[in-house]
Image (spheres, rainbow, N blue to C red):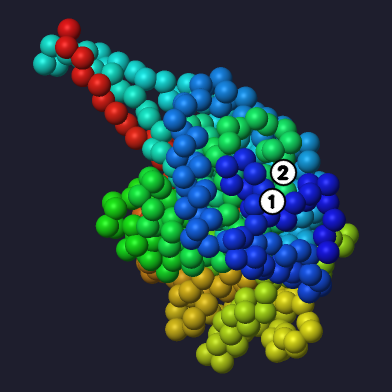
Amino acid sequence: MISSPLLKEFRGFIDGSWVGADSGELLEVHNPATGTLLAAVPNMRNVETDRAIAAARASMRIPSSAAERATWLSGIDHALRENKEELARIITLEQGKPWPEAQVEVEYAAGFFRYYAQHLDRLEPHTIEEEPKNCRWTVYSRPVGVVALITPWNFPLAMLAKKLAAAIAADCAAVVKPSAKTPLTMVAFFSLLEDKLQFPAGRINLLLGQAGAIGDALCRNPSVAMISFTGSTRVGSELITKTAPQVKKLALELGGNAPYIVFADADLDRAADHLIANKFRAAGQTCVCANRILVEDSVADRFADKVAERVRNLTVGDGMDEGVDIGPLIDANAYEKVRGYLRDALDKGARCVAGADPGELEDDQAPFFPPAVLADVNESMKCSRQEVFGPLVTIMRFADEDEAIAMANNTSLGLAAYVFCKALKRAEQVAAQLHFGHVGLNTGTGPTPEAPFGGMLQSGFGREGGLEGLHEFVEVQTLAAAK
């Protein structure tokens, strides 16, 4: 069992109190690297969800001032940074990523609270210069209301921070639903909120349990004004359908199929280094990591060799062990999925230049998947069409710029893309033709708190981060006053 000063409770948090499931049912949480039981948490359902929503709604009867919200946001930023190592340890134990990488996640999460604390003035009302119809027109940013924040297991703290920081800044009350695979990070976070800050009871609530009953209740309850969800396109589509009768506001960050385009004039060593940092974060289990590496024909073999050389130096193991670069996949199903992509590509003619088929996972084995690099991948292979979500590098060839753009855009998922090319004007022209919400030019970096991030096409809609992310949680009200 896990022991931590931040885990005094293993329950949900509703209306300012720690609570279990009415049914008494529990869900086990295991360390993916060792299989060890870490804790058992409540499996809450619709009854607890409705209580949390009611508490959140009641908490909004008294608005909070901008000064109060700034204090909360700054306080969370400070608390996260002050407890970075322990929060990161909890993330590593339940999610698997290396401990240093988990510490970067905590710092990243803290950045959202810090950024919005510094930009609350952007929600101040403003009066337009014109006075049409002999009226004075003032535009207000009102909180959207009670918001449901549903987060995945790959970044159990950062994905919540993106949403909650903006919700607090906008003066919304929140009902938080983390993944049942990684609930302990959220329990630790709520423990910090209780110890360090004085939120009104019901302003931020935590529901633990399987997604089905909780998600249905969040969709059904008319007091939930907005749902912000990060996860699969399939579930995002279901949320659209289930909330349509109430015309509920949605912000959806869904799946990705990121192209990583390397032109012949690129700095190949830089492109290879950035690919390693991009692709193997969270063992490749990120929606923004490179999924299809598109390399110009004349340098494809050289680039594959450079990537393979780097991959052979990566260490796979328990994320709490020193020197580990890649932790386990989240579970056996994830392992078998990635292995299936690898086997399909090899069966269809791909060439393995680093790594190998790791074989079937035995019942008592942890889901460690050694990284692999495949060359000569083509669009007949599943790994070129679907999100791999694992440490498998798939290199495809293109002949010219037009083909590179066509291959990159040959997907319904438009979340992130990357272009490596020394001619910056050309790179910018290529970026303008890519149907992706985030494009890195000569960098594999992902999103940052200061800039908006989100998808196009079936990767969702809405933005997180930046001022655009803040405005997702407000409704604009225009007041016309007769002169």
Q: Which of 200 and 446 is in front in this view?
A: 200
Residue wearing tag 2: 191
Kind of residue at disc 1: Val
Viewer-closest of 126 and 12: 12
Q: Quadrant of the C terminus?
A: top left
SS assignment at label 2: helix
Q: In the rendered structure, find residue 305 and report the number of the disc placed on it.
A: none
Image quarter of residue 312: bottom right
Image position, residue 392 (x, y; %) = 63, 73
Q: Position of residue 91 (x, y in %)?
A: 73, 56
Crowd tier of the residue under label 1, counting other residues whose Cα lies within 10 Å: few below 14, some 14–19, many 20 or above: many
In this rendering, does residue 367 appear at all? yes
Residue that label 1 marks: 187
Assess whether mark 1 and mark 2 are in contact (beta carbons under 8 angstroms). Answer: yes
In the rendered view, does 98 fall on the left or right side of 475? right
**Residue 264 can be seen in this image:** no
Q: Which residue shows up at 77% across the image and 77% down it?
A: 366
View extreme (top): residue = 483
In the picture, measured across the screen, residue 369 lies left or right of residue 172, that is right
Find the residue positioned furthest to the left. Answer: 133
Residue ID at (75%, 75%): 368
Tally of marks: 2
At a point 56% along the width and 85% down the height, the residue shown is: 345
